[in-house]
Amino acid sequence: MKNELSAQAIAQYRQDGFLVVEDFLSADELAFWREALNEAVAKRNGNKLPDRKEVYGKGDDADKSYYDNVFDQLINLWQDNEKIKKIILDERLGKMAAQLSGADGIRIWHDQALIKKPWANPTSWHLDTPYWSFSDRRALSIWVALDDASYENGCLFFIPGSCHTTTFENPGIGKNMGAIFTTYPEFKASKSVAAPMKAGSCSFHNGLTIHGAHPNMTPGYRRAMTCAYMPDGNTFNGTQNILSDEEVSRLKVGDLLNNNELTPLIYPSV
């Protein structure tokens, strides 16, 4: 794993709100991640989370059929697959997330397999952090390509620097590719940057960086394994997202999100 970050790479991430790391995984590591994903997806049998089929706060009914053909989304695979758990709870990943974000400690918010099936819809411009149950401008995700991510099959695009001025408002992922620019009109004329990646490469992006992806214009799959990271010390903001009804019933706004069974600390605070 190419897990050492230079000062230049960290500075670039903090300026642009994203960073691409080429050849992040070795050939053997890539094979292991693919094997783990295949096993985990098969075990889920269509469930997005270990305990249910849907994710709270993911679009409205009018956009559901469109959204369901953007990608297959499976969350918290680490909770019911030991191989994914080994991958996701790797302290080296937590250290990278801490270095990029400037946080002293990093917790898993959730992992996420994102699989664009053949002929899948585009992923409209969106933000990540507004979906989550905490509000932190440092929150970020890793996105690991398990297949080549190309212009043809749905590579990521970013709007550099957008994370410095976006807020926690988000129109979500729907049919309108440019809906986000009704919320953030200042970026409507911005130049986007494509991030095609070979299988085994990865990117990190801030959860408030505007990003999206092409449709899959091929008969093949575009598989990615991702993980959202929460800086340690965050508190509940009232949004349910991945939290179960039972967990939400125990929380009130302002409570620490420090349950190691649900959001494990993978890089300790100093």
Image (cartoon, helix red, strand yellow):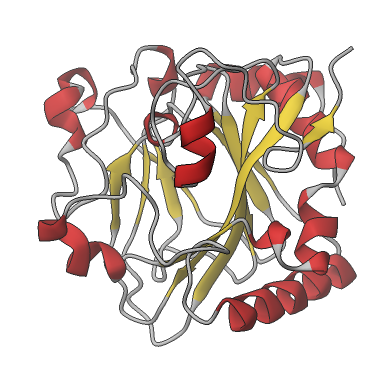
Left or right, residue 69 beside residue 151: left
Residue 158: % across, % down: 41, 38
Which residue is more in the foreground, 95 or 54? Answer: 54
Which residue is more in the foreground, 140 or 194? Answer: 140
Total labels: the figure holds 0
Left or right, residue 184 beside residue 216: left
Residue 25: % across, % down: 81, 58
Residue 46: % across, % down: 47, 77
Q: Residue at x 87, y 39 (%)?
A: 92
Residue 84: % across, % down: 76, 63
Q: Is residue 187 visible to the viewer in this orientation of the structure? A: yes
| In the image, residue 83 above or below residue 220 | above
Please, which residue is most extreme toward the bottom here?
219
Q: Residue at x 70, y 58 (%)?
A: 79
Left or right, residue 13 beside residue 213: right
Q: Quadrant of residue 122?
A: bottom left
Q: Residue at x 85, y 46 (%)?
A: 90
Left or right, residue 198 beside residue 33: left
| In the image, residue 8 above or below residue 142 | above
Which residue is more in the foreground, 66 or 177? Answer: 66
Q: Quadrant of residue 77?
A: bottom right
| In the image, residue 167 above or below residue 128 | above
Q: Residue at x 53, y 63 (%)?
A: 51
Q: Quadrant of residue 128?
A: top left
- Quadrant of the image for the C terminus? top right
Q: Is residue 242 visible to the viewer in this orientation of the structure? A: no
